[in-house]
Amino acid sequence: MKRYFITGLLIWVPLVITVWVLSLIVNTLDQSLQLLPEAVHPKNLFGFAIPGVGALLTLAMILFTGLLAANFIGQKLVGWWDKLLSRIPVVNSVYKAVKQVSDTLFAPNGNAFRKALLVQYPRQGAWTIAFLTGIPGGDIRNHLRGDYVSVYVPTTPNPTSGFFLMMPRNDVVELDMTVDEALKYIISMGVVAPPAHARVVTHT
């Protein structure tokens, strides 16, 4: 009975969690329907709510914004919008910080989170997986002796929280695995191991 129960649990737990996460995402994106007049909401048009319509609207808005920003006029509008927000106290500091992070993470030519690393943390002899985010900049660089890299050490099982560290490049080991494989390994708390071909190659 115990074996059958565990087997059933292994089937249902991933399915339930997957449905829950997708439902959370869809319900969050559906909030974009609030931007439309009440008269055109699916509930008022058809008499019942249609899950996912807001998600499709959100994706369409993102795609349209990308298409608009790709041409000359769109770039001018984006530049004007950036200048406007940069003149508003408090808003400018938050907007600039978030924009810099998003540009770094989502830019096609960005290097953030492109490499999975092996580092010793939180003490010598204890190893964990981290992600390369860049190199120290600003005045920090003037106070670090030698070649340093910036890394993000995620927590388990929630990789969206973690620690930002600056470590000597020689203390960081580059792993022969993708970022997705490393994230799965972290989220599963080491249960879902990377493919057998993954191996440590060189120091980054």
Image: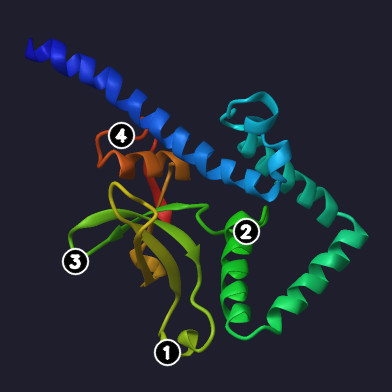
Which comes before the other along the chain, label 4 or label 1?
1
Q: Which mark is residue 123?
A: 3
The answer to whether the residues at label 2 and label 4 have Cβ atoms under 8 Å apart is no
Q: Please, what is the three-letter code of the amino acid marked with disc 2? A: Gly
Q: How is the image coloured?
A: rainbow
Query: Dot 2 corresponds to which residue?
Result: 110
**Residue plotted at (52% across, 44% down):** 28
**Residue plotted at (59% across, 61% down):** 102
Q: Please, what is the three-letter code of the amino acid marked with disc 3? A: Arg
Q: Please, what is the three-letter code of the amino acid marked with disc 1? A: His
* Crowd tier of the residue under label 1, counting other residues whose Cα lies within 10 Å: few below 14, some 14–19, many 20 or above: few
Along the viewing direction, whichever of 55 and 64 lies nearer the viewer: 55
In the rendered image, residue 143, in percent from the top left (x then y), is placed at 42, 89
Which comes before the other along the chain, label 2 or label 4?
2
Judge from the rendering whether residue 73 lies leftward or rightward of residue 42; answer left or right: right
Determine which quarter of the picture holds residue 77: bottom right
